[in-house]
Image (cartoon, grey):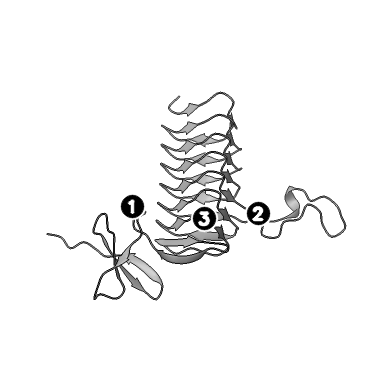
Amino acid sequence: MSYRIQPGAQVDDTAEIGAGSSVWELAQIREHARLGTGCVIGRGAYVGSGVRMGDNCKLQNYALVYEPAELGDGVFIGPAVVLTNDHNPRSVDPEGVQKRGGDWEAVGVRIAEGASVGARSVCVAPLSIGRWAMVAAGAVVTKDVPDFALVMGVPARRVGWVGRTGVRLVERPGEPGVWECPRTGALYEEKEGVLTERAVSPR
């Protein structure tokens, strides 16, 4: 076996677990879920039926990832985060009859490469979180998050930009719309609310 499952975890026989991945105690991986290589699923975390996760993802303790969520490579999900899947949840229909699996349409959260969702955040599906974006702890995300955006609050709003390191970017003096990572010096350009990485010129 090229992955590790701790005693007490529940992993369905139809789930696909990538090489080098670890599933810790009390975690549950449902049927037909697919985890990439090098993933870490923390204690008590839940991965719903058919959820897709890329390589090197981390789900911290008690995170709940409901189907049909899709996580790109390198996504970080903090402790007790919830990715919902029902925008109009009801236990019963208008006649008072309890709803079953086929009585509602599941909608998902899609999280792109490198993005991070902070502890106890809630992402209300359907929505997308862009590449390398960061959701602050305790936020309630109700709409799409752009690439590299830093969002926080209830409901979550963009308050800045972050780079690949997760450090908040600073605008370069005298260069409106040009943002720099204080840690790496990498440059980004903002146009009409969209941030893109500036290509590095070959030497």
Q: Amino acid at mark 3?
A: Arg
Kindly state the secondary structure of the residue where label 3 is placed: strand
Task: Tell me residue 91's x, y (percent).
Answer: 78, 52
Name which quarter of the figure residue 38 lies in: top left
179 relative position to 44: left or right: left
Residue 110 — which label? 3
Q: Which mark is residue 106?
A: 2
Residue topped by disc 1: 165
The span from disc 1 to disc 3 (Cα, nearest Å) is 21 Å
Where's residue 59, x and y in %?
50, 42
In the rendered image, residue 135, in percent from the top left (x then y), is placed at 48, 56
Q: Could you tell me which secondary element the residue under label 2 belongs to?
A: loop
Of residues 118 and 94, the one drawn nearer to the viewer in this rendering: 118
Along the horizontal axis of the image, is 36 left or right of 28? left
Query: In this picture, is 16 found above or below 179?
Result: above
Q: Which residue does the image show at 25% across and 75% down from the upper left?
A: 175
Instruction: Residue lying at the far right in this picture: please name it.
Output: 95
- Name which of mark 2 and mark 1 comes first in the sequence: 2
- Amino acid type, residue under disc 2 in the picture: Ala
